[in-house]
Amino acid sequence: MSWQVYVDSNLLGTGKIAKAAILGQKGGVWASSPGYTAIVSGFNAPDQVQANGIRAAGQKFFTLQAGERSIYGKKQADGIIVVKTKQAVLVAEYAAPIQAPEATPIVEGLADYLIGVGY
């Protein structure tokens, strides 16, 4: 299975996601946009993410919500969505004029699919 296809087609290919990555929960980058990094550890300490924000791709995002499955953040008009599946973490960044209600279902939908097929 090529994880890069999921990033390129299912996330970036929608035109709603600017940067994305699929990371293994135990470490390692499965697929990503060039130059894009993210931290999986936010799910282990959601209170820290809530207090300190999300750091990804050299930027700091204000945390809007941090739960067991999903973390949402904002930086000015841009945002970030981080969703945990059984084995992976999806990270997607969207840029204005795209808004969270347009980008979130794309990322959450891919996460639902991956969970359904065992990932």
Image (cartoon, rainbow, N blue to C red):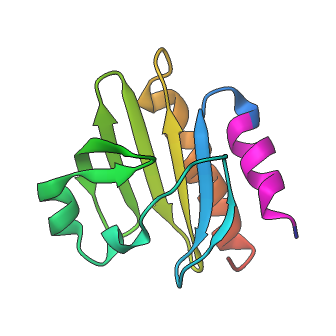
Taking depth in this image into account, of 16 and 116 the one nearest to the observer is 16
Which residue sits furthest right?
1
On whether residue 3 falls in the magenta region, the answer is: yes
- In the image, what residue occupies the spot 44% across and 24% down? 99
Total numbered labels: 0
**Quadrant (top left, top right, bottom left, bottom right) of the C terminus:** bottom right
- In the image, what residue occupies the spot 48% across and 14% down? 97
- In the image, what residue occupies the spot 86% across and 64% down? 2
**Quadrant (top left, top right, bottom left, bottom right) of the N terminus:** bottom right
Which residue sits furthest left?
51
- Residue 103: x and y in percent read 53, 34
- Residue 82: x and y in percent read 45, 55
Compared across the picture, whether 90 is left or right of 15 comes to left
Which residue sits furthest bottom?
26
Write down the region rendered in magenta: 2-12
- The image quadrant of residue 78 is top left
Query: From the viewer's perspective, is residue 38 above or below residue 72?
Result: below
On whether residue 30 falls in the magenta region, the answer is: no
Query: From the viewer's perspective, is residue 73 above or below residue 41?
Result: above
- The image quadrant of residue 71 is bottom left
Taking depth in this image into account, of 88 and 117 the one nearest to the observer is 88
- In the image, what residue occupies the spot 70% across and 62% down? 113
- Residue 106: x and y in percent read 61, 42
Which residue sits furthest top?
97
- Residue 79: x and y in percent read 39, 35
Compared across the picture, whether 18 is left or right of 71 comes to right
Compared across the picture, whether 23 is left or right of 30 comes to left
**Magenta stretch prevailing secondary structure:** helix
Compared across the picture, whether 16 is left or right of 81 comes to right
